[in-house]
Amino acid sequence: MHDKLNALPMKSVRYFALAVLLAAALLGAFSGRALAQDPQPPSDDQVNAVAKELYCPVCENIPLDVCPTQACAQWRELIRLKLSQGWSEDDIRSYFAEQYGDRVLAAPPLQGFNWVFYVLLGVFAIFAVVVYIRVVRNLKAKSTAADASAIASQPAEQDDYLKRMEEELNRREKSS
Amino acid sequence: MLANFGFGALIITFLVAFYGIGAAIYGGVKNSARWVESARLAMLLTFPLITLTAVSIIILLVTRQYQVQYVYNVTSDTMPLYLKITALWGGQAGSLIFWSWLMSAFATAVTLRRWDRDREFLPWVIVVSLITLAFFVGMSIFIENPFERFWMSASGREMVAMFQPAGATPLLPSDGRGLNPLLRHPGMVIHPPMLYLGFVSFVIPFAFAIAALITGRTDDRWIRITRRWTLVAWIFLSLGLVLGSRWAYDVLGWGGYWGWDPVEIAAFLPWLSGTAFLHSVMIQEKRGMFKRWNMVLVIVTYALVIFGTFLTRSGVLSSVHAFAQSAIGPLFFGFIGITFIVSLALLLHRWKDLTSAGQLNSMLSREALFLLNNLLFMLILLVCLWGLIFPIVSELFTGQKVTFGPPWYERITGPLFAALLLLMGVAPLSAWGHSTVKTLGRAMWKPAIVSVAVLAVALASGVRSVGALIGFWLVGFVIAITLYDYGRAIWARHKRSHEPLPVAFWNLVGRNRRRYGGYIIHLGIVLMALGIIGIEMFQTETQGTLKTGESLSLSGYTVTFRSLAEWNNPDGRNIARAVVDVSKDGRYLGQLAPRRDFYFDAQQSMTIPGVRSTMDDDLYLLLVDWEEFNSNQATLKLFHNPLINWLWVGSFVLILGMLVAAWPDQEPEAAVQRAVQKANGRATAD
């Protein structure tokens, strides 16, 4: 449970942080007007609402809103910047997916190779349900057959049993 | 010197294990009791040998022998003694030794049992246990050697080797890097051992299953022998998962207990198949059904135990390329593949001998509902397993990794878990063999009314989420049914034998510990479900940067920032700690002090939340950010986690139930034998 939290590869973190800073600087340069027009910067909660749905490409499986690394803190600032420019949450998610790949999304989108995942998951699940139904049917059929044969064979079995009982009683009577 | 001694003991363990495998196979095939006994003694010998290895590592860790690479990596001067000891499982090489040590302990315990009536199983149980042990010991010797040391070559190059290379001199670092800060938590002292105990003890039922397949003794004897082993394995695995959740809640600083992280899922998978197996074996015992399915389940559980260890140890989770670079990965992969294929081959070989004796008479009979329970467990397992491995598959084929986050897992598995809860309520009231809607309805209408009342209370309290309402109804339903079933049985005893109610309760549980322990387990699970519903559906959060005296409010709580202090602790930590006042609806409740610890040796930080706990909720407070040299401002994050403590209360109830269910009692056959002997003795005396 703890391995994901081992030290991050510092080189990757540095490159990532650099890329984020660069993107932030470029965006800042082109959106000075937009910022100036917005009197109320987005709150931490608004930023976290978007960040919660995104995953850091450097840290394994940690949502961006709780990732404690410096790189992720800068990424959150980038989200704040985009929100202040009026981007929607979907726009921001798409932007990050384009920049860093589908792995930043909380679930792979239905496209390309990801179809394999969803199709096979469905196939596996259907297979499991079919196996279950077959097992139940077989066991039920066996049960019906057993009931039928039990009813059919009952008199004969009883006859045989009575016959053996009588034989045994006769034998005992004779021996005594 | 000590490193050489420990390594020597490890090599002898490996050789003894190989001898034991050979002797057991020969003894089993030739039906030679002498060879089997020799193999048994070899099995017994592995435990003291591997204990010597483990103790050697612990001594190296405690005495700060930093020339040993493993010691250097996981300890430092500033660590307290208990953490130096538990650092045995704090790194890869040590944890593999720990795994082997536990495996050897369990296998030894098995070989010490009385084998009078199951002698034919013994050689094959030894073979399976020793093959597993030899694999792990072999990896420690050839790939992840915990005794390798640092050396300095004549040319001044640092190197790592077990034995002194020619011309090299020993290199002794002055201090170690220290344990990962996240592992320096009391929970980590006990969480990994529990998880590993759960993993290794599932090897025992598997070993008996394989022995049954090899010998052809495919009746339910192997299941009766391993019933308690399976329960013990399940107990440890459950404890490991619960403790891991608590550790995550206390240490990871995300406000939750379960993040659907791949390592968590890897430990959860054998729990799913193991739980299905625990239910399924009851059908074989009671009705002689599902013999093949039980074999499949135990084989899958064993494979998942090794697969879980493989996933967390091979580096494959961080990247498929790490797998290619790591020598441990392909070996694990090969071992899983070979054991799985051989097990399936044996199963197919005995396929015809494993036909079900019973039939399914009703879709509402207990066996039918248990079968449905197994289907649900398997579907959850399928979702988790595929979600776990698909990122690796995707990276392999496209070079791109994908992520499956908690919302995805919760969306897919939520309804399946809800269906399991429903079954947990209905199945105990259904009868073996035959049940109808009428009989079930008659048995459950009273608890059902109580559960509807619970639903009404939830609605009246303002709950409008359909998912939450269904969840609360299910919780009420299962609790009502469990208590109703208990109450009915206790009352019946009380009326029949005039026992006082507490005595009736005690005797009831004592007479059928497995059944009533199982019900307590169900109760524990339902209470845990209550906590999960609370945090998953009603958790709220907010974050803000506060100056001294400023406040932040969430769900009736108000947090007022008072001060921030930052200092260097003598134990090698830089601590930043905020102090806040907490009040609820205007009433002052006290102070909380969330903090961030930065460990100089490991160059990592750890977020310690400030938590105020009640049975209603937790206020969970994190120090997110602050400015250096400015103690008048801090960024705080608040989580309101309703009902979360029911998760931990449920865990305690679960443990209690597990202890009741697993408590040793007389084996039925042994009891019968004793009764017969007693009767014979009386007859002779007469």
Image (cartoon, coloured by chain):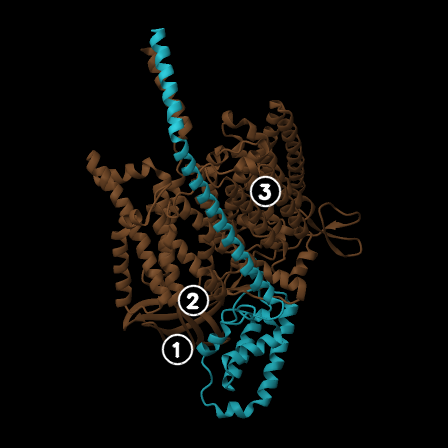
Chain colours: A cyan, B brown
Question: In this view of the protein, which residue sits in the foreground, B504 or B89?
Answer: B504
Question: In this view of the protein, which residue sits in the foreground, B142 or B368?
Answer: B368
Q: What amino acid is at disc 2?
A: Pro
- Label 2: few (<14), some or many (≥20) within 10 Å? many
Chain for disc number 3: B
Q: Nearer the viewer, mark 2 or mark 1?
A: 2
Q: Secondary structure at mark 3?
A: helix
Which of the 4 image quadrants contains residue B361? Answer: top left
Q: Secondary structure at mark 1?
A: loop
- Residue B548: mark in rendering: 1
- Residue B594: mark in rendering: 2
Chain for disc number 2: B
- Residue B154: mark in rendering: none
Q: Are marks 2 and 3 on the same chain?
A: yes
Question: In this view of the protein, which residue sits in the foreground, B96 or B581?
Answer: B96
Q: Which residue is mark 3?
A: B100
In the picture, which quadrant includes the C terminus of chain B? Answer: top left
Chain for disc number 1: B
Q: CA distance from mark 2 to mark 3?
A: 39 Å
